[in-house]
Amino acid sequence: MRNALAHVPPKQRPAAVAMLKTIFAQDSAEAAHAQWRQVADALRERFQKLAELMDGAREDVLAYMTFPREHWAQIASTNPLERLNGEIKRRADVIGIFPNDRAVVRLVGALMLEQNDEWAVSRRYMSLESLASLSDDPVLRLSAVSA
């Protein structure tokens, strides 16, 4: 949204936001793609750069709609990523100055492994049952708990 609004004058942004939000209010991927085209065409005359950005970004932005509907809010949210970045910053601030690049990679890698384990086992962000519809394999197991 920020990238899109960078191509719109500040006084026109509320109207552009209202139009763009109609895309994400759709109930299906087909309806969202149709609304995307309609909004892009409506904006094309006044905001050519925005329409060009929309033409190139449609598949990437609407990719979350291929997942089950109950996952849409989690996919659209950046909260887990922001929390992880905050934890990396917190741990890096404790260290202060790293002796070399490998030390940074080691710390961040350890944090990523720790977070992966937490998301996979104790705090699943998406349930395996709800993801089963996306898989050709009816039996889903976590490698950490399947043994």
Image (cartoon, rainbow, N blue to C red):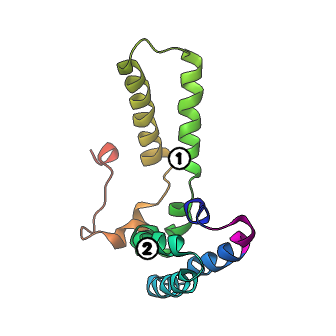
- Which tag, 1 or 2, sits closer to the chain's start? 2
Q: Residue at x 68, y 67 (%)?
A: 9
For the C terminus, give its image quadrant.
Answer: top left
Residue 15 placement: quadrant: bottom right
1 vs 2, front mark: 2
Query: Which mark is on residue 81?
Result: 1
When the figure is inspected, residue 97 is found, relative to residue 2, above or below; the finding is above
When the figure is inspected, residue 30 is found, relative to residue 68, above or below; the finding is below
Q: Residue furthest top?
A: 99
Residue 99 lies, in percent from the top left, at 43, 11
Disc 1 is placed on an element classified as: helix
Residue 22 placement: quadrant: bottom right
Residue 66 lies, in percent from the top left, at 40, 74
Residue 70 lies, in percent from the top left, at 52, 71
User: From the viewer's perspective, is 134 left or right of 124?
Assistant: left
Give the residue type at disc 2.
Arg
Give the residue type at disc 1.
Leu
Disc 2 is placed on an element classified as: helix
Could you tell me if residue 67 is visible in this image?
A: no
Instruction: Depth check: give the residue in front, 47 or 91.
Output: 47
Q: Residue at x 53, y 40 (%)?
A: 84
Q: Give the residue number, with chain letter if any, for mark 2.
A: 58
Q: Residue at x 33, y 51 (%)?
A: 142
Residue 102 lies, in percent from the top left, at 35, 20
